[in-house]
């Protein structure tokens, strides 16, 4: 366990479904991130939250909607996804929003859109 | 945009040998980080080297940084089967908020 917990580990959803990914950290970190990892592509940063405020939205389609109710929890709400959205979604946290320290990652949610 | 690029993309060696992976980046940085990812899992932070450091050690890991060449290397000595994983370098960039940008990684296979 890294201290960052992601649920569920695996998710299969239809294109018309609505689902949510959850990330939880108990490390006292102030910043949280969503990354997308697709096959044969670099990790893509999706969203950055610092002290519960979204500070970065990296041109992500509106079918992905993040939510950060407090500094320990981060959600990614999914709606009307496309098959190309199938990927490993990784949550990470860090001590502060400036990458002067390492990030701690969760184990990821493997999403398959059918 | 991609900041770090690892080389080689894949590396296969025998157990006990040393593995060297390289990373090149484009812009000025204040630190560079290396991560490991076992198949289908999250990334694990290995080591961070600051821009005023030239070399850093952690166990069997040795990282070097050459800011004049904008490059870094990760050396794993006396490799073990458990070292089989993908290795990524990551560098901070400033585009809006500061954030870590990852390369595509080096897939390392240690053969018994």
Image: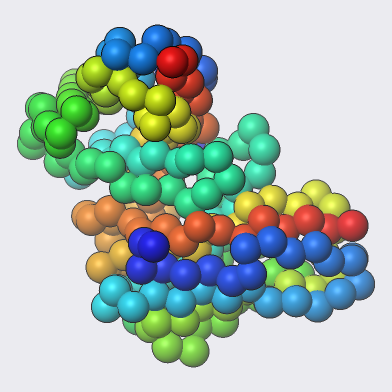
Q: Is residue B81 left or right of residue A101?
A: right
In the image shown, does B41 or B88 lie closer to the viewer? B41
In the image shown, does B108 or A19 lie closer to the viewer? B108
Q: Quadrant of the C terminus of chain A?
A: bottom right
Image label count: 0
Quadrant for residue B74, please give it.
top left
Q: Residue at x 68, y 77 (%)?
A: A20
* Residue A91 in sight: yes
In the image shown, does A53 or A76 lie closer to the viewer? A76
Q: Is residue B13 left or right of residue B54?
A: right
Q: Position of residue B32 (x, y in %)?
A: 26, 39
Q: Residue at x 47, y 32 (%)?
A: B86
Q: Position of residue A32 (x, y in %)?
A: 42, 70
Scheme of colours in the image: rainbow
* Residue A48 in sight: no
Q: Residue at x 23, y 56 (%)?
A: A101
| Residue A37 to residue A34: above or below | above
Q: Position of residue B77 (x, y in %)?
A: 23, 19
| Residue B55 to residue B2: above or below | above
Q: Residue at x 15, y 36 (%)?
A: B58
Quadrant for residue A93, please give it.
bottom left
Q: Position of residue A76 (x, y in %)?
A: 62, 73
Q: Is residue A26 left or right of residue B57?
A: right
| Residue A24 to residue B85: above or below | below
Q: Quadrant of the N terminus of chain A?
A: bottom left
In the displayed orientation, state which residue is furthest to the front. Answer: B112
Q: Is residue A59 left or right of residue B68?
A: right
């Amino acid at each position: 366990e890294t201290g960052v917990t992601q649920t569920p580990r695996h998710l299969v959803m239809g294109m018309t479904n609505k689902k949510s990914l959850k990330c939880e950290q108990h490390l006292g970190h102030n910043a949280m991130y969503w990354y997308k990892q697709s096959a044969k592509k670099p990790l893509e940063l999706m969203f950055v939250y610092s002290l519960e405020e979204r500070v970065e939205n990296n041109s992500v389609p509106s079918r992905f909607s993040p939510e950060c109710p407090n500094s320990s929890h981060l959600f990614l709400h999914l709606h009307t996804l496309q098959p190309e959205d199938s990927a490993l979604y990784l949550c990470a946290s860090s001590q502060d929003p400036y990458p002067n320290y390492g990030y701690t990652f969760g184990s990821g949610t493997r999403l398959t859109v059918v | 945009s991609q900041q770090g690029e690892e080389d080689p993309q894949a590396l296969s060696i025998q157990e006990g040998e040393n593995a060297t992976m390289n990373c090149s980046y484009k812009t000025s940085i204040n630190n560079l980080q290396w991560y490991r990812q076992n198949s289908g899992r999250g990334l694990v932070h290995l080591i961070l080297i600051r821009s005023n450091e030239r070399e850093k050690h952690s166990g069997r890991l040795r990282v070097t940084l050459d800011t004049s060449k904008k490059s870094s290397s990760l050396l794993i000595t006396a490799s073990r089967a458990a070292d089989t994983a993908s290795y990524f370098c990551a560098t901070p960039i400033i585009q809006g908020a500061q954030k870590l940008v990852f390369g595509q990684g080096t897939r390392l296979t240690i053969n018994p």
